[in-house]
């Protein structure tokens, strides 16, 4: 057990130092996709998922970040009653839960995909729905506020210079925030482009540029950015969480032939089996609980 906690402590330290690749690499001998000894301590498991998910987001592996956060939040939903019994962990678990919901909302704005319905229903609550709406409209300030709320407490790898005044621009938090906002700024037009592409099968480049009120040259750069940003490394198999293959994660695909954009809908039909299975389990648990009641 001590070895597991030592590796998870290294995960936290490297995340706070901003070395996200090394943070995930130290866990390469722990299969995060199966129950291990660290799962016996719920707070440890939640913390692990939080830092791994955040490292994925900062490495632009949004699909893996969404999967990690979703698994953690589903686990918290199942174990909520146990956390209420352990009151000393409530504050930490509740804060990390809010942080993971916030980062999950950011990931879904930058990389939309279908998630578990119970998690999606929480994101549709007013607390998060307004944040998502502002981020989809390109509000960089909302992205910044979400990052500042959900990020870990960063550490500087070097001691401050005692003979020089502190420079706010060199603070670890400011540096990481700047990197994140630069990445978001490159994708600021993508939600709008995606919304227009869903409405058409073919569309002139000039028409799309007129809808977005930008120059055609800028639009072509944005379309190329769309192709690039939606093509990410996604974990599929292997023990190491750094393993993965490049996959296209967009629900719409397109190609440009001369001055015409041709759009193909790649969205997979919704699967209802998981929803009904989950509802059956809930009803079975309710039935067993009612049988134990004595009237």
Image: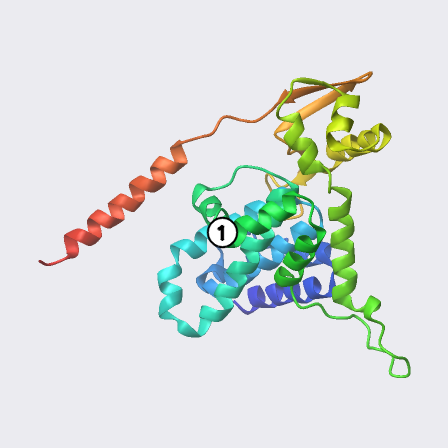
Which residue reaches farthest left? Answer: 295
Q: Quadrant of residue 231?
A: top right
Seen in the image, is 162 located left or right of residue 199? right
The number of numbered badges drawn on the structure is 1
In the image, 34 versus 20, the foreground residue is 20
163 with respect to 277 (left or right):
right
Asked if one can make out residue 34 in the rendered structure from this viewpoint, the answer is no
| Horizontal side of residue 274 vs 47, given as left or right | left
Q: Look at the picture and state if 161 lies above or below 230.
A: below
| Helix, strand or loop under label 1 | helix
Name the foreground residue: 265 vs 278.
265
Given the current orientation, which residue lies at the most extreme right position? Answer: 163
Residue in front for this viewpoint, 29 or 244: 244
Q: Position of residue 40 (x, y in %)?
A: 44, 62
Image location of residue 169, percent across then percent down: 83, 66
Residue at (53% x, 59% y) in the render: 98
Relative horizontal placement of residue 203, taking residue 47 as reference (left or right):
right
Q: Which residue is mark 1?
A: 126
Q: Quadrant of the C terminus?
A: bottom left
Colour scheme shown: rainbow
Above/below status of 79 relative to 135:
below
Residue 78 placed where, x, y %?
A: 39, 54
Asked if residue 225 shows in the view, the reply is: yes
Q: Quadrant of residue 18?
A: bottom right
Question: Of residues 17 and 25, which is closer to you in this image?
Answer: 17
Q: 111 above or below 16?
A: above
Q: Position of residue 150 (x, y in %)?
A: 61, 60
Residue at far bottom of view:
163
- Residue beneath the point at 56% across and 67% down: 5
Q: Dot 1: few (<14), some (14–19), or many (≥20) neighbours within 10 Å?
A: few
């Amino acid at each position: 057990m001590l070895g597991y906690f030592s590796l998870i402590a290294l995960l936290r330290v490297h995340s706070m130092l901003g070395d996200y690749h090394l943070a995930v690499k130290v866990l390469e001998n722990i299969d995060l996709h199966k129950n291990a000894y660290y799962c016996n301590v719920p707070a440890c498991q939640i913390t692990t998922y939080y830092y791994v998910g955040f490292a994925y987001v900062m490495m632009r592996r949004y699909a893996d970040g969404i999967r990690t956060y979703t698994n953690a939040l589903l686990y918290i939903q199942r174990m909520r009653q146990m956390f209420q019994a352990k009151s000393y962990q409530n504050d930490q678990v509740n804060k990390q839960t809010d942080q993971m919901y916030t980062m999950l909302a950011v990931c879904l704005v930058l990389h939309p995909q279908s998630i578990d319905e119970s998690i999606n229903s929480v994101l549709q609550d007013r607390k998060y729905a307004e944040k998502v709406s502002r981020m989809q409209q390109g509000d960089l300030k909302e992205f910044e506020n979400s990052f500042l709320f959900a990020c870990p407490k960063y550490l500087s790898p070097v001691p401050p210079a005692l003979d020089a005044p502190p420079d706010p621009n060199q603070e670890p938090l400011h540096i990481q925030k700047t990197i994140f906002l630069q990445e978001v700024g490159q994708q600021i037009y993508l939600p709008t482009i995606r919304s227009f592409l869903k409405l058409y099968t073919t569309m002139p480049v000039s028409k799309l540029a007129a809808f977005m009120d930008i120059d055609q040259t800028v639009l072509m750069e944005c379309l190329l950015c769309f192709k690039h940003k939606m093509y990410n490394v996604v974990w599929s198999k292997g023990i190491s969480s750094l393993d993965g293959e490049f996959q296209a994660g967009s629900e719409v695909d397109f190609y440009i032939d001369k001055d015409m954009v041709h759009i193909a809908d790649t969205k997979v039909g919704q699967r209802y089996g998981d929803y009904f299975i989950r509802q059956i389990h809930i009803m079975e648990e309710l039935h067993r609980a009612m049988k134990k009641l004595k009237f």
